[in-house]
Amino acid sequence: MIKQIFGKLPRKPSKSLNNDSNGEGAVNSYYAPNPSASGSRVANGTLVPNSDRKIQAPSGVYEALPSFRDVPISEKPNLFIKKLTMCCVVFDFRDHSKNLKEKEIKRQTLLELVDYVASVGAKFNEAAIQELTKMVAVNLFRTFPSANHETKILEMHDMEDEEPSLEPAWPHIQVVYEILLRFVASPMTDAKLAKRYVDHSFVLKLLDLFDSEDQREREYLKTILHRVYGKFMVHRPYIRKAINNIFYRFISETEKHNGIAELLEILGSIINGFALPLKEEHKLFLVRALIPLHKPKCASVYHQQLSYCIVQFVEKDFKLADCIIRGLLKYWPVTNSSKEVMFLGELEEVLEATQAAEFQRCMVPLFRQIARCLNSSHFQVAERALFLWNNDHIRNLITQSHKVIMPIVFPALERNTRGHWNQAVKTLTLNVRKVFSDIDQALFDECLAKFLVEEENKTEVKANRERRWKRLEDLAGSKTSEAELVPRFVSSVNLASSSESSG
């Protein structure tokens, strides 16, 4: 009885399985898709224990298996599994002169697997799904250098200028991604069966790979994760939460991640499919993750995708416009002019989807900021702010609330016409000034009169201040003269005294 119990327990793997004895290439750890299970199901229905062993190259010669064309249809599923097992060997691509023959054999085998997955005529059984996910895990799942995660970038504007490092094993990794993509997209993949192996752990490791510096890899990951999100509905909340966590860490800790743009691109498509009314979870995601993503210095790298996501929320629920605009104002750049131009572009897209009621809630702080932009010495910032009046919808919103907006922006417009260095900005300012005069001439004249009075008061205050400083300077000068005379007088008295005493 005891022997039977001990016989069912998993055996400890031998050391020879954990080491690459023949030195033909480093191999990643075996990935157990379902760690809660005590064993993995194989083709005949029996259970064999999982282990943390490493797949290693065969002790003999690494040779190609027969082609799928050369075997009967009945043997193709077993050959498929054998080829997957064979591809669990990972070669070292850092040395290009090493294992050339074996690397080419593996690449050709992977290409055969791509064709098989794309053209298979029957549902994948559990053994095939298990072996395929294991092969994918062994070849793809890896950690990146810690420097990418631990160091906080100080000069993120140089990020786009840096040359990204390319994955040396891409000749194999690309085909593995192609296999995974076709497997997830295949109608022969049963989602209910596959979710046992394409589980939370598998998805999380896929998300970790988005930090790869290789743009080609991130493009594949973007497509695959989107297909996983579409096929495995049970994983959707988990995927959204995991992406949130990546954003939180990026915003609050590292400000360094290579895949933010790709993740936002996926989310743009996900947000587009949100049902109405929006869930509270989705609104919290907007407030806690998307809006704070405007804060990092490297926002220009992913701003286009972020702006698309933000606009999607406004188009889904126009009542969110006030929250979004106030969020933009909170993270508005102070000294970064190029980032300010991007914010103004995004603001225009948000305002284009904003209704009058939401606009009126935030127009006072909004146009105070726009007025500051109008007077920017950087001509592109001023120009981009003035372009807002070229948008018909925004101009209509301004017209409806001109009694509040005109007094806020008029001083900035008038200062531009009188003293801005850029002629294009001056011309645009005169056009906007004319728009306001056409809307309400009486209020325009009132604002102009108030501006002239304020300017006169400022001139008087400035003159008074200069007079005070002049008096202080004169007083300080006279005190200095007295201070210089006293030592001279004392020295003269002392000299006279000494002369008398000597006489």
Image (spheres, helix red, strand yellow):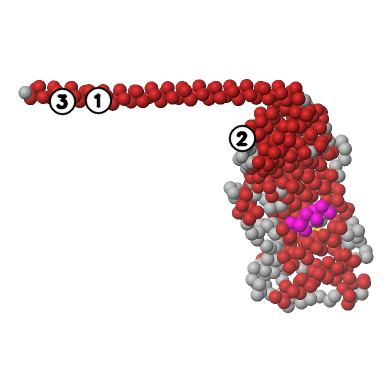
> Between disc 3 and disc 1, whose residue precedes?
1
Sort mark 3 into few (<14), some (14-19) or many (20+) by Cα contacts within 10 Å. Answer: few
- Majority secondary structure of the magenta segment? helix
Residues under labels 2 and 3: Cα distance? 63 Å
Q: Is residue 207 visible?
A: yes
Q: In which image quadrant can residue 481 be found? A: top left
Q: In which image quadrant can residue 490 be found? A: top left
The residue most toward the left is 503
Query: Residue at 63% across / 33% down in the picture?
Result: 418
Query: Residue at 91% across / 60% down in the picture?
Result: 188
Do the residues bearing badges 2 and 3 touch, measured as CB atoms within 8 Å? no
Q: Nearer the viewer, mark 2 or mark 3?
A: 2
Q: Which residue is label 2 attached to?
A: 419
Residue nearest the observer in this picture, 156 or 82:
156
For residue 487, the mark is 1
> Between disc 2 and disc 3, whose residue precedes?
2
Q: Label 2 amino acid? A: Gly
Residue 259 spot, x, y in % from top left: 71, 52
Q: Is residue 248 visible?
A: no
Residue stretch rendered in magenta on the structure? 217-228
Q: Which residue is label 3 attached to?
A: 495
Residue 301 spot, x, y in % from top left: 69, 50
